[in-house]
Image (cartoon, helix red, strand yellow):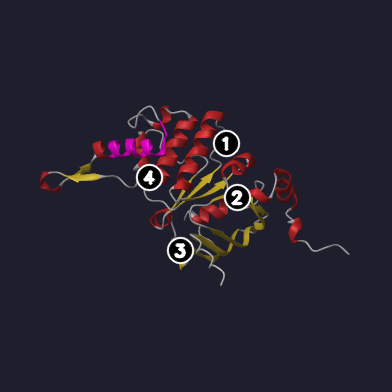
Amino acid sequence: MSASLPTPLVEMRGISKSFGAVSALRHVSLSVLPGSVVGLVGDNAAGKSTLMKILAGAILPDSGSILIHGRPAVYDNPIGAREAGIEMIYQDFALVPELTVAQNIFLGREQVRRRWGGVRTLDTARMNRRARELFASLGLRVPSVTSPVQALSGGQQQAVAIARATGFEAELVIMDEPTANLGAPAIEKVRQTIEGLREKGVAVILISHRLEDIFAIGDRFVVMKRGEIVANREVGDTCSEEIVAMMVTGRDPRAEGPTA
């Protein structure tokens, strides 16, 4: 008897989405195994971000379904996705510049304490302490968890977004162009963070135009074109030239039959 295949952490089945007359996604199906790193690639109109925003609860699909650990998952906002173990790091980081590092990490999940008379107040000391622990466990650095985010560099803001997404028992983290506009040291730090997540069993979907990042740390490429998935490739079974060709043509040459 052959061994049974592992149950995917996440399955998206037959996802479709239109914006007016524009069809952004057409019957897209995607699965992600626990602890795997999937590179989602395609041109700027391929539908990558739309598909991931649906998975993250930021956009509702017109049709299709999502399963988590083989069970139907129903949510209609990012909080519901977060409760299901799915976090997304957006390309612009989605941070509040005026708030501190710790306040951004706990935004929407503030720690509170009760004082005499039942008055609830923010437990700032507890949030600051927990934020420091998060950065230490991830191997990330910022000047101080009490610094306003607007005073940080791009790489440091990326670190804040990663800490916020991974610090609360996420099972899948979606990263939208996490190494865009970063220098070489910051890019290497992001790669190390993704490796650390995989070692902890956390799956990562990496939307990126930097194929070298996916070849360095990924397990699988998923190629999209015009709202459809056109190919899947194991990282060790492809090359940059093949991935780029499929992104441009929208065709998988291995799936095409022999010519007459």
Give the residue displayed 65% in from the left and 48% down from the top.
236
Mark sitting earlier along the chain (1/4)? 4
Mark 2–mark 1 Cα distance, whole angstroms, equals 15 Å
Which residue type does callout 4 highlight? Answer: Gly
In contact (CB < 8 Å): disc 2 and disc 1: no
The residue tagged with tag 3: helix, strand or loop? Answer: loop
* SS for callout 1: loop
Residue 207 image position (x, y, % from top left): 57, 46
How much space separates mark 2 and mark 4, taking CA atoms?
23 Å
* Residue nearest the observer in this picture, 192 or 70: 192
Q: Is 227 on the left or on the right of 129, as rendered? A: right
Measured in 3D between alpha carbons, the distance from the residue under mark 2 to the one under mark 3, in whole angstroms, is 21 Å
Q: Mark 4 = which residue? A: 167
Q: Which mark is residue 69?
A: 3
Say which label, 3 or 4, has the lower sequence index.
3
Specify which label sits upstream in the sequence, 2 or 4: 2
Q: Which mark is residue 180?
A: 1
Q: Which residue is mark 2?
A: 40
> Which comes before the other along the chain, label 2 or label 1?
2
| Residue contact at pointers 3 and 4, CB within 8 angstroms | no
- The kind of residue on which mark 1 rests is Ala
Of the residues shown, which amino acid type is indicated by label 3? His
